[in-house]
Amino acid sequence: MNKTEAMIWSVLQRPMMYTVNGAYGEVVAFLTGYYSGAAIGHPHEPSVRIWGDFSLFVRNSLQISGSNVFGAFQDIHGVGSLEALKAKYEEFAKAREVGHLID
């Protein structure tokens, strides 16, 4: 796991360290903003693309249409969205680890 992936894990494991209330929407907004800012000047770096790659993984695995992937994810999972997001990210990380996803 590189530093960039560790950042996502850290936020998902301890959301109140990074956001005001540790709510699902705050976590998604924080990570989206963080990786959007990191992509400025380095949009093709695999470590910078990880949040976008995860978003695509979520979209494809849940067959979500439209651009608001994480909003649709919340609609699907309701109050359990943050726990479901952690589980989905673990699934994504395992798929990357065994080479089912390509950088």
Image (cartoon, rainbow, N blue to C red):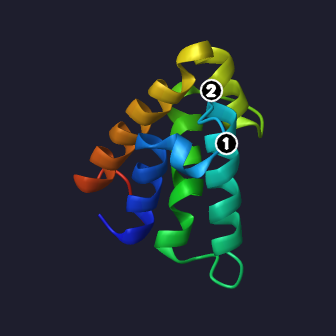
Q: Is any part of residue 102 visible from this angle?
A: no
The structure residue drawn at horizontal position 57% and vertical position 51%, both measured from the top left corner, is 18
2 or 1: mark nearer the eye: 1
Residue 94 in the image: state x and y as whole percent. Answer: 28, 45
Q: Which one is nearer the viewer's eye here, 96 or 40?
A: 40
Residue 24 in the image: state x and y as whole percent. Answer: 62, 32
Q: Which residue is mark 1?
A: 20
The structure residue drawn at horizontal position 54% and vertical position 37%, both measured from the top left corner, is 58
Badge 2: few (under 14), some or many (20 or more) residues near its Cα, within 10 Å?
A: some
> Which kind of residue does numbered mark 2 sit on?
Phe
Disc tally is: 2
Q: Which residue is mark 2?
A: 73
Q: Is any part of residue 47 visible from this angle?
A: yes
In the displayed structure, 58 sits above or below 84; it is below
> Which kind of residue does numbered mark 1 sit on?
Val
Q: For numbered disc 1, what is the local secondary structure?
A: loop
Residue 49 in the image: state x and y as whole percent. Answer: 55, 65
Quadrant of the snapshot with the C terminus: bottom left
Which quarter of the figure has residue 42?
Answer: bottom right
The structure residue drawn at horizontal position 39% and vertical position 31%, both measured from the top left corner, is 87
Q: For numbered disc 2, what is the local secondary structure?
A: helix
Specify whether 90 is left or right of 79. Answer: left
Which quarter of the figure has residue 23?
Answer: top right
Quadrant of the snapshot with the N terminus: bottom left
